[in-house]
Amino acid sequence: MNEQNELIKRRLEELDEIKKLGVNPYPHRYDVTHKSADIIGSYTDPADEAEAEIRKQFIVSVAGRISAIRRMGKATFCHIKDDTGRIQLYIKRDDVGEISYKILKLLDIGDIIGVKGYPFRTRTGEISVHCNSFELLTKSIQPLPVVKEEITETGEKIVHDAFADVELRYRQRYIDLIVNENVRETFINRSKIIKSIKNTLEKYDFFEVETPTLQSVYGGANARPFVTHHNALDIPLYLRISNELFLKRLVVGGFNRVYEFVKDFRNEGIDRTHNPEFTQVEWYQAYGDYTDSMNLVEEVVETACLAIHGTTKINYQGTEIDLKRPWKRIRMVDAIKEKTGLDVLNTTKDNIILYMKQNNIEFDTKLAHSKGLVIASLFEETCEEDLIQPAFVFDHPIETTPLCKPLREYSSEQIENMKNDTEQVIYVERFEPYINKWELGNSYTELNDPILQRRLFEQQEERGRGGEEETHPFDDDFVRAIEVGMPPTTGVGLGVDRLVMLLTNSVNIRDVLLFPLMKPLT
RNA sequence: GGGGAUGUAGCUCAAUGGUAGAGCAUCGCCCUUUUAAGGCGGUGGUUGAAGGUUCGAGCCCUUCCAUCCUCACCA
């Protein structure tokens, strides 16, 4: 990209020539009366010559970026793109005058112009604007990739020499968006999905809130945080890994139904389904339990799919997936039994570990101290790969999270004694929606017993001291809030990026993030 | 972090270790209903960076940078 590049040099010369002709290449505003799609959509062919003459009085004003130019001596065809699509312009020297036509010759692909003229149909059938005048609105200095679009006789669009370098596409998304129409569509769909989710939640009287991104105690998930520093207060701060604990405080405060779309930050690896910052929507509902959340998750996802596809059936990279409610619901231990035949409820911890070793199932020995974690790990290694169609996997071992309520069937003595009996696994009312093998979210019947909450945080701290890297830190203020009293509550966190990937058939999370994190070029 | 692959003109891509090329874009000329417009003629390169082997390196070797795939980690 050196500045001596011939193409850029040439364009700077053109810019000078344009200025010398008395034209401001960067004017301040332009009155647009029509969008390209409106012009094409509302066009009807005139009945006869007389009507065609009259039509010439109906002037449209349309603006956009030049995407193709075909010059033919004293007449020029070009296509401009606006936010509704593209439209062809027909500009004749005799119509616009000599000086304007001279300026037209100085224009390039990438320049933004506004034109006034009347719609007509060309000899080859394309609805176009016959221009009486045009105005340069912005001169482009950086040459764009030249993408040729061919419309076949069957109406199919073939894109030639597409701008395909993924690295450049992510780093210079503005160019990607100009040139690659499907990229634009993906982000329009992302917006529609988010809007749909909001609509569904608002329909049930959920209330949108905002909670802190900078937190002095992070929590609500198992993840390593980004650490920063506040100068004036001279304290470390963390970028949130979750907003869960704040939303629950709001339920304590009396907002019975709250939701927030939120950027979470996790200091971990980057791959096809992980970006250091990503979007979740979380919502909390007082007086409900996790079965209410299952119902709402189904509805939120199904409705979002309908909003952009008009059907519940999607094709993700060749896999047919139907998001129609109701989804399959299965206990984690039953999923394991179905897949492996192993009845973990009636098998000792050591025998499960033995089974995993015998079957070459990956196993982290750091988890060997807890039967619950062994079971969760067995599930992840064996069952996840089959969870293509939407399914709720529920009732996880309590060791997987300190924020979730144990099953209602337990007596308080059983929960009390769980530490003393290593073979006794306490299960919690948690579920994860799986689609296409991905955990799309996470949900609990929220723990609101402050005594147990405190104990579970303490156990997390203990495990942290024992070497586990990603445990929940103890949050005193949060426990205080629970002590004030949180009503029976259920909550959900849903991964928005992954949902958008699914619904837009995107392979990489970067394809659904406008500006994914890239290593800076040195 | 491990393994595999890629990086050549503005874009998309070629090039047995032996003169770096094509299409589009760009520039000049012709062309007043073209549409991947067309015709004729030009310009354009530190082959990601730095070393090395060789008479000779885009190609072989080393290191580095970036990206992709994959594994690990990870809601």
Image (spheres, coloured by chain):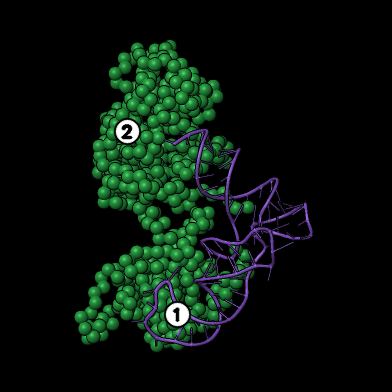
Chain colours: A green, B purple
Q: Earlier in the sequence, mark 1 or mark 2?
A: 1
Of A112 and A454, the residue lying toward us: A112
Tell me, for residue A230, which label it has, or none: none
- The amino acid at mark 2 is Phe
Q: Which residue is disc 1 drawn over? A: A71
Q: CB under 8 Å between callouts 1 and 2?
A: no
The residue carrying pointer 2 sits among few (fewer than 14), some (14 to 19) or many (20 or more) residues within 10 Å by Cα, namely: many
On the image, the x and y values in percent for residue A157 come to 37, 64
Q: Which residue is drawn at 45% across and 65% down?
A: A160
Left or right placement of residue A116 versus residue A98 in this view: left
Of A331 and A301, the residue lying toward us: A331
The residue carrying pointer 1 sits among few (fewer than 14), some (14 to 19) or many (20 or more) residues within 10 Å by Cα, namely: few
Establish if A57 lies above or below A237.
below
Where, by quadrant of the figure, is residue B4 drawn?
top right
Q: Residue at x 55, y 36 (%)?
A: A236
Establish if A20 lies above or below A219.
below
Where, by quadrant of the figure, is residue B7 drawn?
bottom right
> How far apart are the alpha carbons under marks 1 and 2?
60 Å
Of B60 and A88, the residue lying toward us: B60
- Secondary-structure class at tag 1: strand
Establish if A9 lies above or below B64.
below
Q: Which residue is disc 2 drawn over? A: A392
Of A56 and A219, the residue lying toward us: A56
- The amino acid at mark 1 is Arg
On the image, the x and y values in percent for residue B6 come to 58, 53
Subunit bearing disc 1: A
- Secondary-structure class at tag 2: strand
On the image, the x and y values in percent for residue A493 come to 37, 37
| Viewer can see residue A489 | no
